[in-house]
Image (cartoon, grey):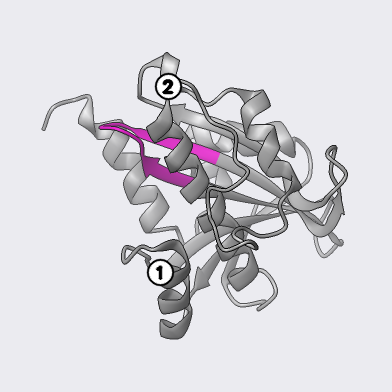
Amino acid sequence: MKSYLFPILFFLIFSLIPPLQAEISSMHPILQRALRKHWPKGQIEAVSCFLKKEEIKELGNSLGSRRIGRLHTYYIMRKEKDSPVQGYAFFDTHLIRSQTETLLYTLSPKPFLSGRGKQSYIRSIEPIVFYEPEEYRPPANWLEQFYNRMKFGDDGVLEKNVDFLTGATLTRQAVIRSVARTLSLYRLCIPSGRGSKSKS
């Protein structure tokens, strides 16, 4: 196997097969540093969410995709053990052109008023891994437009009102699908209280 394919396969596998009993200290350093950047001193719990068949079907239909796995991982951030939840985090790895991108989402446990004056759950979106040429990387100010969304597709058109990204149409499409997928998983996984937790 060519050496440059290994990191790509690693992040694809990580997004599809989350650990059931892994502490974040055993995670890949890139992912661990990304989480600790947003939550440097508190407790982070890794939670595995198992979707039901009907939820997989619903998610696939809403996103227009048949490649929806049953098992997903998200992260709960607290100040200390058993204290109230301060936030959640999701990693989403996806293909853009021929290479992958991994985005880190941090989300609020309750909706808040965003900078655009709308209610939102998304606090931040950050590219953690980006293997495409740099000219295709989504700029931070472009990603900020997604911070005002509680859920995606309220108007029935997934890409409506999303700014164009000059010279990076495939990046734009991949990020839109990623945001929609992450918000859908947030809705399906978080309120249910299901999952196998591992603390660190």
Image location (x, y in percent) of residue 73: 52, 59
In this view, 45 is above or below 192: above
- Residue where numbered disc 1 is placed: 60
The mark found on residue 136 in the picture is 2
Q: Residue at the location (47% across, 23% down)?
A: 137
Image location (x, y in percent) of residue 129: 45, 29
The mark found on residue 25 in the picture is none
Within the magenta stretch, is there residue 141? Answer: no
Q: What segment carries the magenta color?
A: 92-103
In this view, 128 is above or below 189: above
Q: CA distance from mark 2 to mark 1?
A: 27 Å
Number of other residues with Cα within 10 Å of mark 2, as a class: few under 14, some 14 to 19, many 20 or more: some
Q: Name the amino acid, label 1.
A: Gly
Q: Quadrant of residue 171?
A: top left
Q: Magenta stretch mostly in which secondary structure?
A: strand
Of mark 2 and mark 1, the one earlier in the sequence is: 1
SS at badge 2:
helix
Q: Quadrant of residue 100?
A: top left
Q: Name the amino acid, label 2.
A: Tyr
Number of other residues with Cα within 10 Å of mark 1, as a class: few under 14, some 14 to 19, many 20 or more: some
In this view, 48 is above or below 101: below
Count of all numbered marks drawn on residues in the image: 2
SS at badge 1:
helix
Q: Residue at the location (42% across, 25% down)?
A: 168
Left or right, residue 122 beside residue 69: right
Image location (x, y in percent) of residue 135: 43, 15
Residue nearer the viewer, 81 or 143: 143
Image quadrant containing the N terminus: top left
Q: Residue at the location (30% across, 35% down)?
A: 8
Residue nearer the viewer, 199 or 166: 166
Image location (x, y in percent) of residue 163: 59, 34
Q: Residue at the location (59% across, 72% down)?
A: 188
